[in-house]
Structure formats: C-alpha cells, structure tokens
Image (cartoon, helix red, strand yellow):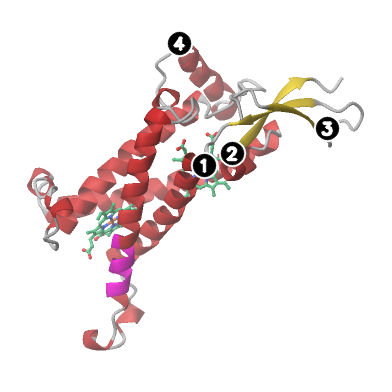
C-alpha cells in the first residue's frame, strides 16, 4: 500500500450527521510493530528481574541455597531477556535506514526547521497547555521522536553497563568486549549503581508513554493505539460539516 493509502469513510462521525472523510495511511511497518512489542515484553521482563536481582525478596531464602534455584532463574531470565532486547534493538537500528519515512532516523532527530517548530507547538499544547490544539502528525510527532531518540541512547547505555557486569562472569566474546567499561566507571559498584538507576528511567518512561498513547488516541480519534498493532493511522481530509 502506498504512503498516501486508501480513502475510507468514517462510519461513526462525531456529530452523527455527515460522515467525516479520512485517509487511511500505513504508518508502522511490520518490523517496527514487531520491534515495539518484543521490546516492550523484554523491557518489562528486564525491569522485574533486574529489580529482584537488586533487591531480592528475603522470604525466597527460606530454604538452603542448594535446595532452591529461584535466584538463578531470575538471573537466567534477565540474561535471556537482555539478549532478546539487544538483538531486537539492532534490528530496529537497521530498519531506521531501510524502513519507510516514519521509521527512518530522520524522524527521530529535529534536523529540519519544521520539526523544531513542531516541538515548540507540542510543548505549548501538551505540556504547558497554553494552546488548545497541537499539531497532528502522521508518524511520531517531533517531540515524541526526540524522546524516543534519548530513550534509544539509554538502551545503549544499559546494554553497555549490562554486558560490562556480565563480562566478569562469562567467557563469551560478546560480554568480553565490554570489560574496559568496569574500570572506566570506577569498578563493579559504579556500573551496578548506574545500571540500577536507569531501571527507574524505564519505569517512568513506560508510565508516561502509555498514558500519552491513550491520551492522543482519545483526543485525536485517529487510531493511535491500534496503529501500533495493525500499522494503520487515519488522517482527516474533510471536516464533518
Ligand atoms: C515497556 C513498554 C513499552 C515501551 C518500552 C515502548 C516503547 C516505544 C518506543 C521506543 C516507540 C517508538 C517506536 C519506533 O519508532 O521504533 C513506541 C511507539 C509507540 N508505542 Fe510504545 N512502548 C511500550 C508500551 C506501549 C503500550 C502498552 C502501548 C499502547 C497500549 C504503546 C503504544 C505505542 C504507540 C501508539 C507508539 C507510536 C507512537 C507515536 O506515534 O509516537 N506502547 N513505544
Ligand atoms: C534495558 C533494561 C535493563 C534493565 C532495566 C536492567 C536492570 C537491572 C537491575 C535493576 C539490576 C540489578 C542491579 C543491582 O545489583 O542493583 C541488573 C543486573 C544485571 N543486569 Fe540488567 N537491566 C537491563 C538490561 C541489561 C542488559 C542488556 C544486560 C546485558 C547482558 C544486563 C545484564 C545485567 C547483569 C549481568 C546484572 C548483574 C546480575 C548479577 O549480579 O546477578 N542487563 N539489571
């Protein structure tokens, strides 16, 4: 389907009289959607298991260490989710070069003047609420794109610090590539501290992100939530009246 998509009639117009006309646009390609949900699942698993590694629940220590393996499973799941998350992220990096214009890296960085203006407009409408209506963007709005870009940097940081900790317990080439990070960050404690701290960045990001996804879905009525499942969004081409 071309980027301009097909035109569909809205069957449930807001004022119940004249149907509004919408253009249906294929925004999120399958690799972007697959990346999104694999990443979301892996991150939730990483946050829960990471939290348990940092603050193990004492009740689970009821039996002798040789009689139970729950902490081993928590660590195993953390490492499993970490590998899924890292390779999934590498696939998304690749798609940032070959995907459609909504997936491309240019949609994450405010390189154009129009993107910088859009950031100001979104802040006025969504953050400061000094304007009633913000810009309607087909892909990510420019502010969301920039925030995702910073989130991707945190993904990289978390991967580097994670593999740095893993390097002391593995002989595999991949973690061993990150041994240099430990002395650079002042030893194991420093790496562990920062790796732990960014857990809370992800928790905050997810709460705000999911809230905003539902908020935009509600106020724009263009299928924002379903777009990250099916790929399609709707752009209004004619008003109700
Ligand atoms: C751990 C949970 C989640 C994380 C880490 C996450 C992260 C992300 C990231 C990084 C993007 C940018 C995708 C890209 O262009 O490659 C994105 C987009 C999106 N996510 Fe999530 N997400 C999570 C959960 C959810 C949930 C639960 C929903 C909805 C119910 C959701 C709805 C969306 C939507 C609608 C977009 C496209 C938004 C836009 O137009 O800017 N996400 N998410
Ligand atoms: C991206 C999301 C991630 C989050 C939120 C996360 C969170 C955490 C947390 C909170 C801890 C406990 C730190 C402490 O001792 O207080 C931890 C430990 C650890 N994480 Fe992650 N992590 C993530 C990704 C990764 C990745 C990509 C790797 C790569 C292999 C990794 C490897 C490790 C290792 C090796 C430990 C130490 C395990 C141990 O000492 O038993 N993490 N993580």
CA–CA distance in space, label 2 to label 3? 23 Å
CA–CA distance in space, label 3 to label 4? 34 Å
Identify residue for label 2: 231
Q: Residue at x 28, y 63 (%)?
A: 54
Main secondary structure found in the magenta portion: helix
Identify residue for label 1: 30
Give the image location of residue 231, x and y in percent.
59, 39
Lower sequence index among marks 4 and 1: 1
Identify residue for label 4: 113
Q: Residue at x 40, y 55 (%)?
A: 42
Q: Secondary structure beneath disc 3? A: loop
Lower sequence index among marks 4 and 2: 4
Residue nearest the observer in this picture, 90 or 204? 90
| Nearest-to-viewer mark from 3 and 1 | 1
Lower sequence index among marks 3 and 4: 3
Residue nearest the observer in this picture, 190 or 68? 68
CA–CA distance in space, label 4 to label 1? 30 Å
Q: Residue at x 47, y 45 (%)?
A: 36
CA–CA distance in space, label 4 to label 2? 27 Å
Q: Secondary structure beneath disc 2? A: loop
* Residue 14 disc label: 3
């Amino acid at each position: 389907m071309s980027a301009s998509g097909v035109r569909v009639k809205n069957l449930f117009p807001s004022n119940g009289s004249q149907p509004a006309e919408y253009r249906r646009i294929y925004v999120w390609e399958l690799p972007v959607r697959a990346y999104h949900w694999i990443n979301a699942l892996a991150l939730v698993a990483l946050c829960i298991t990471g939290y348990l590694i940092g603050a193990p629940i004492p009740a689970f220590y009821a039996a002798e260490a040789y009689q139970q393996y729950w902490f081993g499973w928590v660590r195993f799941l953390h490492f499993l989710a970490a590998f899924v998350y890292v390779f999934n992220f590498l696939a998304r990096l690749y798609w940032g070069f070959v995907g459609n214009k909504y997936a491309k890296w240019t949609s994450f960085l405010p390189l154009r003047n129009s993107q910088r203006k859009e950031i100001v407009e979104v802040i006025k409408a969504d953050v400061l609420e000094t304007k009633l209506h913000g810009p309607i963007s087909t892909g990510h709005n420019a502010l969301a794109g920039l925030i995702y870009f910073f989130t991707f940097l945190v993904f990289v940081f978390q991967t580097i610090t994670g593999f740095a900790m893993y390097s002391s317990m593995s002989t595999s080439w991949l973690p061993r590539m990150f041994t240099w990070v430990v002395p650079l960050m002042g030893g194991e404690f420093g790496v562990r501290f920062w790796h732990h701290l960014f857990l809370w960045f992800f928790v905050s990001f997810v709460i705000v992100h999911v809230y905003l996804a539902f908020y935009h879905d509600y106020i724009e009525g263009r299928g924002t939530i379903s777009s990250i499942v099916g790929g399609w969004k709707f752009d209004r081409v004619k008003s109700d009246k």
